[in-house]
Amino acid sequence: MHEMSLAESVLQIIEDTARKQGYTRVKKVWLEIGQLACVEQESLRFCFDVVMRDSVAHQARLEIIEMAGQGHCAKCLIEMPIAALYEACPKCGSYEIQVTGGDEMRVKELEVE
Amino acid sequence: MCTTCGCGIGQTFIAGHALKQPRKPGGVMRYRVHGDGAAHTFQHGALDFGAGAAGTHVPGISQSRMVKIERDILAKNNDYAAENRDYFSTHGIFALNLVSSPGSGKTTLLVKTIAALHGTLPITVIEGDQQTDNDAARIRAAGAPALQINTGKGCHLDAYMVGQAIQQLGLQDESLLLIENVGNLVCPASFDLGEAHKVVILSVTEGEDKPLKYPDMFRAADLMLLNKCDLLTYLEFDAGLAVDYARRINPTLKVIRISASSGEGMAEWLDWIAKGCHNAVAAVQRTAEPKVLLE
Ligand SMILES: Nc1nc2c(ncn2[C@@H]2O[C@H](COP(=O)(O)OP(=O)(O)OP(=O)(O)O)[C@@H](O)[C@H]2O)c(=O)[nH]1
Ligand SMILES: [Mg+2]
Ligand SMILES: [Zn+2]
């Protein structure tokens, strides 16, 4: 259940920025979560609501922008979409695939007032 | 000191300097999140949010505005991890983060490792478990100082906890630090502690396809120890297949087959540690141009 820690980290980032930017209420939070990131989205949504309670982001809406998995084959040098870490290269069958995208977990932006 | 839980947070942090905090070898450290949800912040750990494009108005919504953040959710953990790593590298400490599912044999392996390396170099252990001091007690009985971190409901160690633990422990220069993470094949993969390597332990009673089921951990590790190999004759476990699966996830993964019980493969593991320690010390000497030691 590290989604709880992730939600707490999101709140830390929101609170730190609140001090700098001088907002008192967060209405919407956009997160970018990669398809290959180690996150269970439903669990993150649940933890998000729990953690934001009574904070500056109380009842904020959570928008998750899913980022597609991208890989690069070390053998035949092609770029390909990948849905899981154990996929083979569709062209040469090699498992030497470097993840080039889709493992991110970022706080992208906020709607505040 | 933190007024909520008295945990010493807010005091000066490590960042490569010798510490002046009271040391409590063999203590127990309990970690909890503050009741007010507030984060502990360090003075010099200044955050940079890239001075985002604040003030952009959302059309039609009078008071609302958009604030660009563009910050990694784990950025704070990664900052703490970088400080730990910096501390290790300036002090010639070789730090390993041992991760596995519960019961794969981490503590048994550590006990045997401590016994085998006895007298050759200083070893310190940080034990992570949700509850109990049992594993730290086993390590102390084996002759090494150990600090137990109880994560309560937490399912992993994070870099902040480890930073606090190393302050309390007072590590020796040119030593080996072994961190036994909470038994969990999922969550510890995401949290960098500042270690040189994650070492994943897979025991042969767990099934060959664990690497495929929990790929993140096998991707994050540099070394896999296939433990309990003494049991292979009693099981239908295909060790070659398990290694194949692990290398699908991580083609450069190094694998050593061991048995913490029988001692099989231990020599190769100890040799790997010795090389790592040697390199950690050599790296300090390389960078040790005429420098002033900050005390
Ligand atoms: N047969 C055999 N048993 C082992 C071996 N290594 C550990 N065990 C046994 O496996 C059980 C669990 O070992 P621990 O060392 O406590 O495992 P752990 O990974 O530290 O467990 P947690 O900290 O609870 O996650 C114990 O009963 C050990 O005796 C091994 O190489 N062979
Ligand atoms: Mg243990
Ligand atoms: Zn290919």
Image: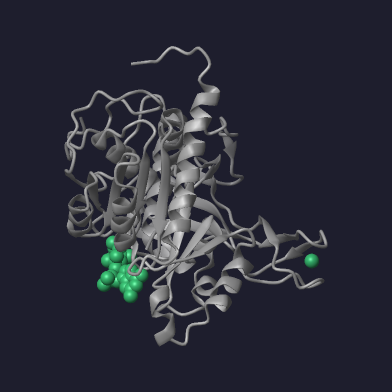
Residue A80 drawn at (x, y percent): 76, 64
Residue B118 drawn above or below residue B11: below
Residue B196 drawn at (x, y percent): 48, 44
Residue A63 drawn above or below residue B61: below
| Quarter of the image that includes the N terminus of chain B | top left
Task: Report the label total.
Answer: 0
Left or right, B95 with respect to B107, comes to right
In the image, B47 versus B25, the foreground residue is B25
Q: Residue at x 40, y 27 (%)?
A: B15
Figure quadrant, ligand 2: bottom left
In the image, B230 versus B147, the foreground residue is B230
Q: Which residue is drawn at 22% across and 27% down?
A: B21
| Quarter of the image that includes the C terminus of chain B | top left
Q: In which quarter of the image is residue B108?
A: bottom left
In the image, A72 versus B114, the foreground residue is B114
Residue A102 drawn at (x, y percent): 63, 58
Q: Which residue is drawn at 43% across and 81% down?
A: B232
Left or right, A44 with respect to B109, comes to right
